[in-house]
Amino acid sequence: MDEIELRIPLPSQTSATFVDNANTPSNQSINPLNSTGSRESNQELEGSTSRSVNASELSLPPVDGGFGAWSFLAAAFFVEAIVWGFPDAYGVFLNSYLQDPRYASQKSATSLLPLIGTVSSGIIYCSAPIINPIAARYPHHRRKSMWLGAALCSGTLIGASYATQISQLIILQGVLYALGGSLLYLPCISYMTEWFVVRRGMANGILFAGTSIGGLTIPLVLPLLTEKYGLSATLRIVGIAMGILLFPLLPFIRGRLPQTRVQIQGPVPRGAPGLRTWIRQKLFWILLAMNTLQGSAYFVPIVYLPTFAHELSVSASKAAITVALLNASSLIGRLSMGYLSDSVNPWMLALSIFASTSAASFILWGILSHTFSGLLAFGIVYGTVAGGWTCLWTGFVRPLAKDDLVMSTALYGYLLLSRGVGNLISTPISATLYAQGGAHNTTTGMVGSEGRLGFDVGDGRFGKMIVYVGTSFAVAAGIAAVGWIVTVREVRRG
């Protein structure tokens, strides 16, 4: 919701009129294109609304600071940690599922089981262009959706604990959990634009760093629970704990601006011109291509590192440390990129991120990860350099949206969608590469021989996967270089 639209009533010919909820019945619907008499009553309503909003404006909490802003950011940080930490820790569950005869013996288990985590995170990403417009049209329902989302996240994990088929796990732990996560998480993004303006890049860095904290703690806890109680009981414990942690946070996640209860009649015109403007810009499509490619590669190590570690003959607890360290080190990348995105060219930062990640994938994962210490080094470096990507989004959005809150939220939605598409296609690709791997050892040419490279671990099953990740980031670096050149030329033109 645009702050300007809340402070200044729009002319009667526009398609939306925003009013303070204290002066409007809860279910009132305003159509500004009524008869002359209705226009006069609308003008009277706008006059009283203007006085009400001006009075409310004086009592609005400050932006970029104060109890309201910081309490919101703290609560949103923990929601981020819980909602995203669980899918980011799915690699631990995948390793356990593949070792469990109940699931590993089912048809196409090696292809279907990796889908659960990807479907979970992918749907949350892809749902943004659907949920955000609905939230913009009915903003007073955003907090209700968060309570429903929290209940779904908790309930679906409890339900998944009783699943006996992989298809049931995909529906419960994958699809329905993602639906709950979308209803819970996406309002946090829309509220962020109300609470933070000048410090928005820093605030986004803090918010997205919640994923790192969740991705650190959850993988360390899951192996302890599964070893002691088993998979089913662990899912029930996690589901109950999630509800206990989430519900007390929700009262602090609220908007800064007055909420409207007016239903908007007809399309909102401000979004459409913005979208048409983006479509005509080369940088918009370059950004989407780069973002989709990043999403298609980034999640592969997060899913498969525990399985890779298992091939090094380490325990399940040690295998979980790989993804825990990856997620923890991404905290450094997210905070640093969030801070730098407020002042440094984001295309230059993107180029450095992707080039460094490509080199780390080939050298640290492909060559040095034949030992557990080498694999840990890869996880730390990968999380640090690749984990900060989403915190650069603020730097890309700002010149396109021109500080328009509606357009900013919409553009974030398209970035989430494109990254979600990349996330969804990454699992079929990586699962196919994993199944095709192991035909020969890249060092000796013999099946099952012990090589001295990370490419050779697990009889070479991960070799093609490593090449895919490294190459994808190299191509993304090339796209970022093109975007940087385009921005430099546009600056020189004036």
Image (tube, grey):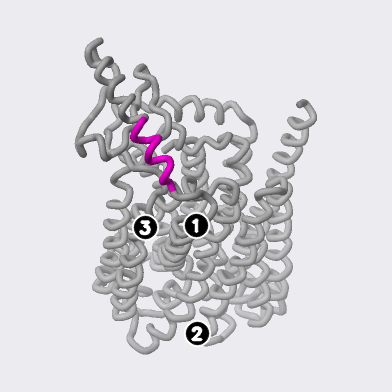
Q: Secondary structure at mark 2?
A: helix
CA gap, disc 3 and disc 1: 28 Å
Q: Quadrant of the N terminus?
A: top left
Q: Is residue 387 above or below residue 285?
A: below
Let me know if residue 126 appears in the view: no
Q: For the stretch drawn in magenta, what is the main secondary structure?
A: helix
- Tell me the residue that label 3 is attached to: 181
Q: Nearer the viewer, mark 2 or mark 3?
A: 3
Look at 20% across and 36% down and name the residue there. Answer: 25
The image position of residue 378, as x and y in percent, is: 66, 72
Q: Secondary structure at mark 3?
A: helix
Based on the displayed image, in which of its 4 quarters is residue 299 positioned?
Answer: bottom right
Q: What range of the chain is rendered magenta?
A: 51-60
The image position of residue 201, as x and y in percent, is: 60, 51
> Which is nearer the eye, 320 or 107?
320
Look at 51% across and 40% down and name the residue there. Answer: 408
Q: Is residue 208 above or below residue 402?
A: below
The image position of residue 101, as x and y in percent, is: 35, 79
Upstream in sequence: badge 3 or badge 1: 1
Q: Secondary structure at mark 1?
A: helix
Q: Is residue 274 above or below residue 260?
A: above
- Tell me the residue that label 1 is attached to: 66
Look at 76% across and 26% down and name the residue there. Answer: 494
- Tell me the residue that label 2 is attached to: 317
Amino acid type of the residue tagged 2 in the rendering: Ser
Question: Which mark is drawn over residue 217?
Answer: none
Look at 30% across and 44% down and name the residue there. Answer: 140
